[in-house]
Image (cartoon, rainbow, N blue to C red):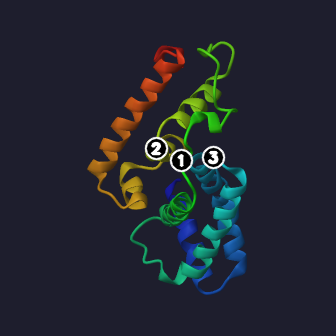
């Protein structure tokens, strides 16, 4: 997000803190798509992502007065969404196997020519750990800086750098297991 958009979110959140419902609707319109897709990639469940996004924006509405401005508004919202998503993980049993997700499983090696690059990347992302998938999602799909990711995850920038390094390593290993070369992407 650019500086102008960040400034707009700051103004909207201040209005929300004062009870302005129109400002809340506008903030929701500006941010909900990226938050939803972030949640969907983490949770791998459309209905659950929709439930968590409702909880997220309810928390935004209720917590707007408590926002101290130590981070960007978008980073704060992603942090709320992340916490709620990981609370859902604690409530549910983790997926035991890729076989639980037959739409993600592949028979043999993938041919990059047979499927588009994005689909290959999405399939590979689904095969790595949620922690790795989350950090790559924030970097590549949402364009967060390492500092913003650190704020969202409540870890240091060096920890973010380490997680990104190992997440990329896991992703490349998954590509290799799928028969996809980095140069093919």
Dot label at residue 139: 2
145 or 136, which is in the foreground?
Answer: 136
* Contact flag, marks 2 and 1 (Cβ < 8 Å): yes
Task: Give the CA separation, mark 3 to mark 1.
Answer: 17 Å
Image point (65%, 86%), residue name:
19
- The vertical placement of 140 against 110, above or below, is below
In which quarter of the view is residue 171 placed? top left
Q: Residues within 10 Å of mark 2 (few under 14, many from 20)?
A: some
Q: Is residue 11 left or right of residue 25?
A: left
Residue underneath mark 3: 44
Q: Secondary structure at mark 2?
A: helix
Tell me where residue 21 appears, x and y as whole percent.
71, 80
32 or 163, which is in the foreground?
Answer: 163
For the C terminus, the image quarter is top right
Residue underneath mark 1: 142
Q: Secondary structure at mark 3?
A: loop
Task: Give the CA separation, mark 3 to mark 2.
Answer: 18 Å
Tell me where residue 55 appears, x and y as whole percent.
64, 70
């Amino acid at each position: 997000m650019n500086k102008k958009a960040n400034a707009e979110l700051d103004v909207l959140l201040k209005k929300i803190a004062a009870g302005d419902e129109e400002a809340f609707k506008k903030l929701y319109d500006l941010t909900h798509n990226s938050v939803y897709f972030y949640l969907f990639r983490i949770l791998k469940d459309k209905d659950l992502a929709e439930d968590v996004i409702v909880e997220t924006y309810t928390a935004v509405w209720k917590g707007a007065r408590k926002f101290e401005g130590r981070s960007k508004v978008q980073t704060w919202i992603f942090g709320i969404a992340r916490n709620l998503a990981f609370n859902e993980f604690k409530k549910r049993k983790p997926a035991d196997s890729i076989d639980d997700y037959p739409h993600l499983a592949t028979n043999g090696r993938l041919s990059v020519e047979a499927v588009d690059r994005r689909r290959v990347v999405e399939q590979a992302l689904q095969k790595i750990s949620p922690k790795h998938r989350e950090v790559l999602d924030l970097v590549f799909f949402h364009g967060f800086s390492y500092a913003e990711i650190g704020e969202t995850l409540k870890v240091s920038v060096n920890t973010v750098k380490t997680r990104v390094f190992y997440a990329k390593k896991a992703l490349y290993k998954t590509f290799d297991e799928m028969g996809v070369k980095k140069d093919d992407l």
